[in-house]
Amino acid sequence: MALLASEPLGYLRLGLNIDHVATVRNARGSTYPDPTRAALLAQAAGADGITAHLREDRRHITDSDIDALMANIGLPLNFEMAATDEMQKIALRHTPHAVCIVPEKREELTTEGGLDLARDENRIADFIAPLREAGCRVSIFLASDQRQIESAARIGAPVVELHVGPYCDAHHEGDFAKSDVEFEKLKSMAQLAYELGLEVHAGHGITYDTVKPIAALPEIMELNIGHFLIGEAIFSGLDSAIRRMRGLMDEARREAIGVTVA
């Protein structure tokens, strides 16, 4: 179960995004590899949740994948979705453990930035109300930006997921001056979100090389990682990739705040 922002800081949850298992499957129009099988392997390897993004164009995860995940996995499902009527109806039909509201453009390769919540505050507030009433934990995917985080607090979104792509991308490109700036923004906005009573998650672009500084931020309660782990699984297997990431997260958390991680 999700910890509330008022509860003690400690264990850091790992959510596996299985979208790109479906990307590989759909490249050949076959029935394999099966995203639900990946989710079950992730559960055995120590993941705490599964994330799946049902896009308008169904480029990777499909409606039948959501049906299968809801029916077969024992982990909480985090249903990533755009703020559209179609996706709201699907979420309300399934009532997954969590929904994460993300921006979506048909022409993008992947989610390119956080939702501009500050510009669309009233509509998103109305949009998430029935999801919350249905019992879904609602998260908003946001940039590390004060205006956006304050908007999330105003509309009563219980969770924000901070887009850590700018930090991770700068690090991998070797622009360490930029990555330092982006990390400081991430750190200060995680603190702000926590102080405003929001549960803080992070995701997008996290690898073995970038996970530990993020995991060491005590306000962050969950990391959602997909593309890197699915790619790494080609070389080491999904079980090994998840266990290594889990180990790095636990090590960083122990070093940062001195907790015992089960």
Image (cartoon, rainbow, N blue to C red):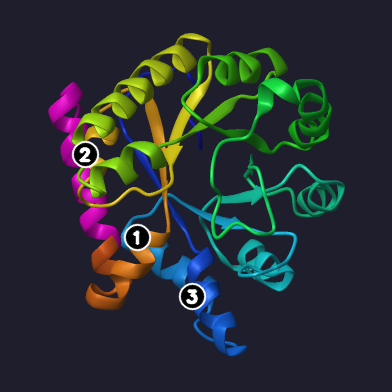
> Which span is picked out in magenta?
242-262
Which quadrant holds residue 72? bottom right
Q: Secondary structure of the magenta portion, mostly? A: helix
Pick the residue in front: 97 or 181. Answer: 181
Question: What is the three-letter code of the residue carrying label 2?
Answer: Lys
Q: Which residue is mark 3?
A: 37
Residues under labels 3 and 1: Cα distance? 18 Å
Q: How many marks?
A: 3
Q: Residue at x 21, y 57 (%)?
A: 244
Tell me: residue 249, above or below residue 197.
below
Is residue 256 toward the left or the right of residue 239 in the image?
left
Q: Which residue is mark 1?
A: 228
Question: What is the three-letter code of the residue carrying label 1?
Answer: Phe
Q: Position of residue 137 (x, y in %)?
A: 63, 35
Tell me: residue 197, above or below residue 246.
above
Q: Which residue is mark 2?
A: 212
- Secondary-structure class at tag 1: helix
